[in-house]
C-alpha cells in the first residue's frame, strides 16, 4: 500500500465508484414535477428511481409558490438537482436554467452565476446550505 488515494483513472476504482454512486442515487426523484403541479397536490409527492414514494415538505412547496412568479412555477421542476462529480473536490453543478433562475430570485445565488456550456458551478458548501434551507426541494446526485 502506497498510502495515497486511488487514482480516478484506475478502472477498478472507477467501477467501484460507479457502483457506490448508483446506490446513493437510488433516492433521487425520477419523476420530477413542476412546482405548479406540486402546489395542486394535497400531499406533494413523486417517485424515486427505485419507485419509492418521495414526499415533499408542504410548507417549503407553499413558500416557493408564494415567492416565485407563476411563469416560473410552471417551468421549475422539483426537486432541484445539484450534481456532484467525484473528480471535482469543492464544487457541484446545476444543469437547469429554471433552477438557476429560481435560486437567483430567492437570493440564494447571485446574478454573477451564469450558465456556461449548459452548467453553472456552485461550491459544495453553498449547495448543502441551500439544501438545508429548502428541505425536500433540493437533492444532490452523484454523476
Image (spheres, rainbow, N blue to C red):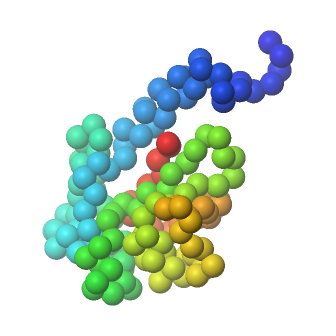
Point out residue 29 in the picture as x, y percentages from the top left corner.
32, 50
The foreground one among 119 and 34 is 119
Placement of 60 over or under 80, stated as above or below: below
Point out residue 138 in the picture as x, y percentages from the top left corner.
43, 61
What residue appears at the point 47 percent right and 26 percent down from the top-left corner? 19
The foreground one among 93 and 57 is 93
What residue appears at the point 36 percent right and 60 percent down from the top-left corner? 79
Placement of 72 over or under 41, stated as above or below: below
Q: In which quarter of the image is residue 113?
A: bottom right
Q: Is residue 73 visible?
A: yes
Q: In which quarter of the image is residue 34?
A: bottom left
Q: In this view, does 36 lie to the left or right of 124?
A: left
Outermost residue on the top side: it is 1
Q: Is residue 114 left or right of residue 22?
A: right
Q: In which quarter of the image is residue 38?
A: bottom left
Q: Is residue 112 left or right of residue 74?
A: right
Placement of 25 over or under 30, stated as above or below: above
Point out residue 104 in the picture as x, y percentages from the top left corner.
51, 79
What residue appears at the point 49 percent right and 62 percent down from the top-left corner? 118
Q: How many labels does the image show?
A: 0
Point out residue 83 in the picture as x, y percentages from the top left corner.
51, 51
Q: Can residue 127 be seen in this view?
A: no
Outermost residue on the right side: it is 2
Placement of 3 over or under 119, stated as above or below: above
Q: Is residue 26 left or right of residue 119?
A: left
Instruction: Please state, as top left, top right, bottom left or bottom right, where the N terminus lies in the image.
Output: top right
Amino acid at each position: 500500500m502506497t498510502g495515497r488515494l486511488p487514482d480516478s483513472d484506475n478502472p477498478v476504482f472507477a467501477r467501484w465508484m460507479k457502483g457506490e454512486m448508483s446506490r446513493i442515487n437510488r433516492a433521487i426523484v425520477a419523476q420530477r414535477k413542476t412546482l405548479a403541479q406540486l402546489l395542486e397536490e394535497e400531499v406533494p409527492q413523486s417517485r424515486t428511481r427505485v419507485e419509492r414514494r418521495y414526499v415533499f415538505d408542504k410548507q417549503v412547496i407553499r413558500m416557493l409558490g408564494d415567492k416565485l412568479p407563476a411563469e416560473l412555477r410552471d417551468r421549475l421542476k422539483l426537486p432541484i438537482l445539484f450534481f456532484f462529480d467525484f473528480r471535482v473536490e469543492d464544487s457541484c453543478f446545476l444543469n437547469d436554467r429554471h433552477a438557476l433562475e429560481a435560486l437567483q430570485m430567492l437570493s440564494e445565488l447571485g446574478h454573477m452565476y451564469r450558465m456556461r456550456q449548459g452548467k453553472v458551478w456552485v461550491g459544495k458548501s453553498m449547495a448543502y446550505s441551500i439544501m438545508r434551507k429548502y428541505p425536500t426541494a433540493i437533492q444532490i446526485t452523484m454523476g
